Image (cartoon, rainbow, N blue to C red):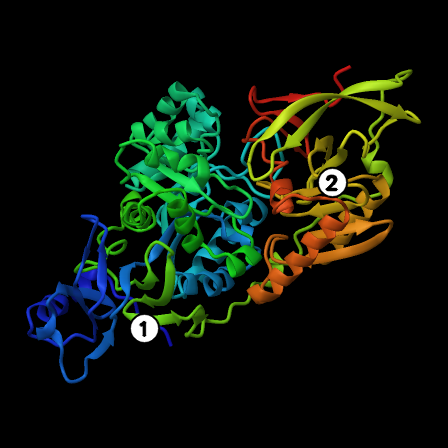
Amino acid sequence: MLPTRRPLAEVTRELVAVATGKLPADTVIKDGKVVNVFTGEILPWDIAIKNGRIASVGDVSAAVGPETEVIDASGYYLCPGFMDGHVHVESSMVTVTQFARAVLPGGTTAIFMDPHEIANVLGMDGVKLMVDEGRELPLKVFATMPSCVPAAPGFEDAGANFGPEEVAAAMQWPGICGLGEMMNFPGVLAGDPAVHDELRATLAAGKPITGHFAMPADFQGLAGYTAAGISSCHESTCTEDALNRLRLGMYAMMREGSAWHDIKATIKSLTETRVDSRRAMLVSDDTHPETLLSTGHLNHVVRRAIEEGLDPIRAIQAVTINTAECFGVAQDLGAIAPGRYADILFLKDLAGVAIDKVMVDGRVVAAGGRLLVDLPAVTYPDRVRHSVHLKEPLTPWHFRINAPAGKSRVQVRVMEVIEANVNTRHLTVTVPVVDGQVTAGVEAGLAKVAVVERHGGNGSIGLGFVRGFGFKAGAVASTVAHDSHNLLIVGMNDADMALAGNTLAECGGGMVAVRDGKVLALLPLPIAGLMSDRPVEEVAARVAAVHLAWQELGCPLVSAFMTMALLSLPVLPELRLTNRGLVDTLQFKMVDLITG
């Protein structure tokens, strides 16, 4: 049974009594080397803990009583638990509970999740389900209220629509710590009334607004965006992007997930300059289950920053005190200091981020990479398990792209993916016409793409082409398709594309790979078409099988299906496809597929 987490206001007298030797501590940690994230020092402090919080540090011998548990930390560095300031749990394809099982042994003790994936499918009901689930876990789960549902109104169709009223209501919910990433940066800069009403509701509640400004090198645009009260942004992909955010007083969130490997470039904003790093944060954003189990979570992100030259203490600050201050919870979290929750990591090696034990609320919950506590069982209701509503079964006819009459060759717009990068390139490619149809072709490196509305609406289908996946045959499909999560299909022939889409409709969503009329691998994700409630290890194994099937079809990319999932997100440069068609995301306008 997990201990009750008590607010500081209820335990001040007891903490002071322990600190002054009038009351014994529940637990004392002795002879460790404490990483002080306030001063950047490493100090030979002991730690006294009462009611899950730190009562005192330094010489705490007066707090040791007959019943006090004494933990020998000789040979360990002690640092605060790691905190992820920007993460989409749904991208890990498991429930919040299973996510906690995966990340707690690696030292993640708190997350600030943005549940906008489930919001786009299930609306407020989906957000509440995830927030409520997170309240029962040793992992401290905070949530930002999704701001852009859908991400780009007028360019796509989602399963829900949020506006100022929904945002204002959510600001009163327990567990909501701010506003989720404001992806509608054109609306912010254009003064859109609804967008600014959402900002106003959040600021009036005294909570931070997290950002998503995806226009590289636009300093003046970023300045205007910051002027709206937006205090952080995770969309830095190069050194200058991160520097600009720091210089404007933002928290620069530097990202390293399964597919987005931005640390190598963004960390240079700190390692190659003399700027202060106290507004730098390390985050994961999107991480697949097999990455969590094999590579790690924030422990991996911190390690990557150190490998790229960042001082280990500055790296630890970027997932502890900096994050706590960004979200206004530094009185409770982010440091080994009196009054804070006793969320403490025991590290055998600081630079190697070798975490041996994890303490949460004064209790060791993981050791040697294993979780030591049972987590509550969670059951999602049946109403969230049937969320793929196609207007009609798909046939090859749905994917036909007719060429203008009399044309033997046409020019088409093409999305070109960039490995380990969120952006695409907007290309124009000349392709042959076969029997009046514009088709995919191995020779040109092109695959056909379809985005099918799946929320029970108009059943519209957007069609386009993509380069860079390397497919030689078959098709793949996913209901994980940011952010509206319509049915996304990429393939080399229309028949396999229809089979892939229909397979996911039948099982309630997920990911699938097919070839020559046969299913090669299937990952069912029945919760909103985004998550599974199966154990994280089982989901990771199925993800690995899908990845292997992608390789069999010719795709060499790392985390290729995460790259695919962004093809439909019309708030990232340069060209995207939604159920309504192609979107030029630099000019924010719909464009034709065939240009000549």
* Nearer-the-camera pick, 505 or 418: 418
Location of the C terminus by quadrant is top right
User: In the displayed structure, does residue 497 sit left or right of residue 105?
Assistant: right
Tell me which corner region of the image, top left, top right, bottom left or bottom right, holds residue 15.
Answer: bottom left
Q: Can you say whether 449 is above or below 227 in the image? A: below
Q: Label for residue 490?
A: 2
Indicate which label's residue lies in the foreground, 2 or 1: 2
Location of the N terminus by quadrant is bottom left
Please provide percent x and percent y for residue 395: 85, 42
Q: Earlier in the sequence, mark 2 or mark 1?
A: 1
**Which residue is painted at 50% across and 71% down in the image?**
377
User: In the displayed structure, does residue 475 sit left or right of residue 541?
Assistant: right
Badge 2 element: strand
* Nearer-the-camera pick, 27 or 506: 27
**Which residue is painted at 85% across and 19% down in the image?**
409
Q: Report the amino acid beneath label 2.
A: Val
Residue 422 in sight: yes
Tell me which corner region of the image, top left, top right, bottom left or bottom right, holds residue 369.
Answer: bottom left
User: In the displayed structure, does residue 457 sit left or right of residue 69?
Assistant: right
Q: Report the amino acid beneath label 1.
A: Pro
Badge 1 element: loop
Q: Residue furthest right?
A: 435
Please provide percent x and percent y for residue 595: 74, 17
Count neighbours of disc 1 (C-alpha within 10 A) and say few if under 14, some if 14 to 19, many if 20 or more: few
Q: Label for residue 3?
A: 1
Please provide percent x and percent y for residue 543: 64, 57
